Image: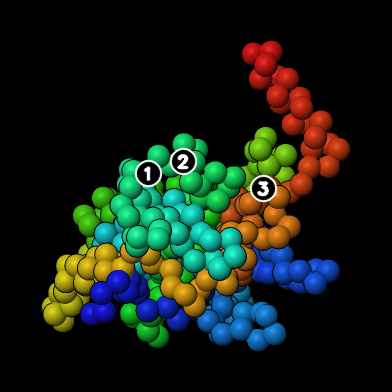
Amino acid sequence: MLKGLSITPPVIGRISIGRVVERSGKRVPEKDDAFTITTQVQQKGEWMLHPLNEELRKATTGKLRAIPVRFLFNNPDLNLRATYSCFDRETGRPVCVGNGDTCRRAGDAGIEELPCPSPDGCTFGQGGACKPYGRMNVLIGDEDEMGSFMFRTTSFNSIRTLAARLHYFAAVSGNLLACLPLELKLRGKSTAQSYRSAIYYVDLGVRTGSTLEAAITAARELDARRRAAGFDQVALDAAARAGFSNGAFEDNIEESPAVAEEFYSSESGRGDSQGDGTAESDVLPAPGLRGKLEQRATLLGGKAA
């Protein structure tokens, strides 16, 4: 195994909420209210759709807002890796990655391990340079049982919700997370911060038409079949943990241009860009007159309280 190279789960496709479009000669993020499943191939700046995208969309009555999935690992933190990440605005390469306690930062002397005070208290990541960044690998379909689809997000709502769900499902199933038949779901919400406009985030639940009890029963049956066949889930989790820890940063140089678009869109004044067609964040629309009045009323109400 090459030292310094993070060994990550094989990716055969991507899950996105939105895409990057060209406006006035600039590539800018455009949000959506549905999932899109793509391959890893681009043509004319657009990610090519994966065959599963059309297959799953036909199975619904409208937009693709739910995707049946399984997970590779029983350990929730191996399926969803969430960090505070600071990227170089020009190259998109990671320069500092932390967890709120410690961080790894690239400098002239190499990689240093330093305290991580989180973005709000870090002078290095001021100005929106440091953000929560989550990467989640899921299995869709049965064609490739080790080939995953990557979902990337800079959304607090998605990261917090998915982390909670993964840990809860692992707990109630007796650590059989990798065997549970689950479903990614797109949810919408409105807040004062979003000027009452809808923002979308990703949730996780049992599949439509099923129950938690039925999902746990199915997980136990699948686990028994795997054990009988010699499938070693404990060894798989251990191999994944060793692979992730083999490198200082998970993102590689090939993903740098996409990360730059995702984090530092040229027209994203708040720094909360929608993504490069593979990532998702809590996108807040620019407030119109009504939004500004509502925001002012909220602030005045807070002061009065």
Q: Residue furthest top?
A: 304
Please say if 20 is above or below 267: below
Mark 2 or 3, closer to the camera: 2
Number of disc labels: 3
For mark 3, give the secondary structure.
loop
Q: Quadrant of the C terminus?
A: top right
Q: Is residue 218 visible?
A: no
Badge 2 density bin: few <14, some 14–19, many ≥20, Cα 10 Å: few
Q: Is 257 situated left or right of 114 in this image? A: right
The amino acid sitting under disc 1 is Cys
Q: Quadrant of residue 69?
A: bottom left
At x 67% / y 80%, what residue is drawn?
45
For mark 1, give the secondary structure.
loop
| Mark 2 lies on residue | 122
* Lower position in the chain sequence, tag 3 or tag 1: 1
Question: Disc 2 vs disc 1: Cβ atoms closer than 8 Å?
Answer: yes
| Mark 1 lies on residue | 116
At x 26% / y 69%, what residue is drawn?
246
- x and y, in percent, of residue 12 in the image: 45, 81
At x 72% / y 39%, what residue is drawn?
195
The amino acid sitting under disc 3 is Arg
| Mark 3 lies on residue | 270
